[in-house]
Image (cartoon, rainbow, N blue to C red):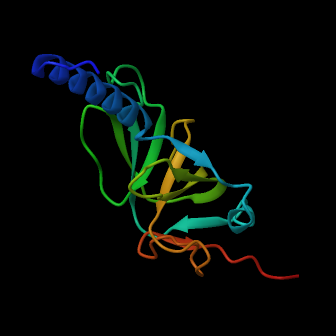
Amino acid sequence: MMKLSRKQLGSFSAVLLFVFLSWFLGHVFDYDEVSHLDEYAELLGERFTLVDKVVAVGVTMDQNYHGDADRIYLKEFGSSGPQVKFRRSIADGVLEIVGVHQEKWFIGAGIYYRVKHKGAQKVPELPIYVHIPGPVNSDNLGLDEALYQRIQIADS
């Protein structure tokens, strides 16, 4: 059996740590499309309105934070950091669910709705995501009731 010196062991450990962190940081914002699953399929096409002002935060997914925003997250209040390319307040509009996504995290599995925005205020043509803090089978689709209200479609 080959013995490793402390220096070799340290170098090997550093390489392993680098590989893990590169993989981990490259997957922090990855999502699996789960719209096809039974529990989410019926959510497609559901609509909700903004009850209160939210902030559209445009972020880049570039590892070096270069370039324009790649996607938008709707939040109760803004975010900061080198990945943030713009913040825009949105006070009105209708959001329609066009996809359901689940985070690829080993420490959790948050759900996000991918939505289309229709309203007087223009939002850049980028994928828009809303984090779902509650159960998707609730009356308000898991959305924060202080910010969003589901549009109930009357049965014919």
User: Could you tell me if residue 119 is visible in this image?
Assistant: no
Residue 18 coordinates in the image, percent (x, y): 28, 25
Q: As rendered, which of 63 and 123 lies closer to the eye? A: 63
Q: Quadrant of residue 108?
A: bottom left
Q: Quadrant of the N terminus?
A: top left
Residue under the image location 42 percent in, 24 percent down: 68
Q: Quadrant of the C terminus?
A: bottom right
Residue 146 coordinates in the image, percent (x, y): 41, 75
Q: Is residue 100 above or below residue 13?
A: below
Q: Is residue 135 left or right of residue 106?
A: right
Residue under the image location 62 percent in, 76 percent down: 137
User: Could you tell me if residue 145 is visible in this image?
Assistant: yes
Residue 15 coordinates in the image, percent (x, y): 27, 21
Residue under the image location 29 percent in, 50 percent down: 78
Q: As rendered, which of 150 and 91 lies closer to the eye? A: 150
Q: As rendered, which of 81 and 16 lies closer to the eye? A: 16
Residue under the image location 54 percent in, 45 percent down: 31
Q: Is residue 127 above or below residue 61?
A: below
Q: Is residue 66 above or below residue 107?
A: above
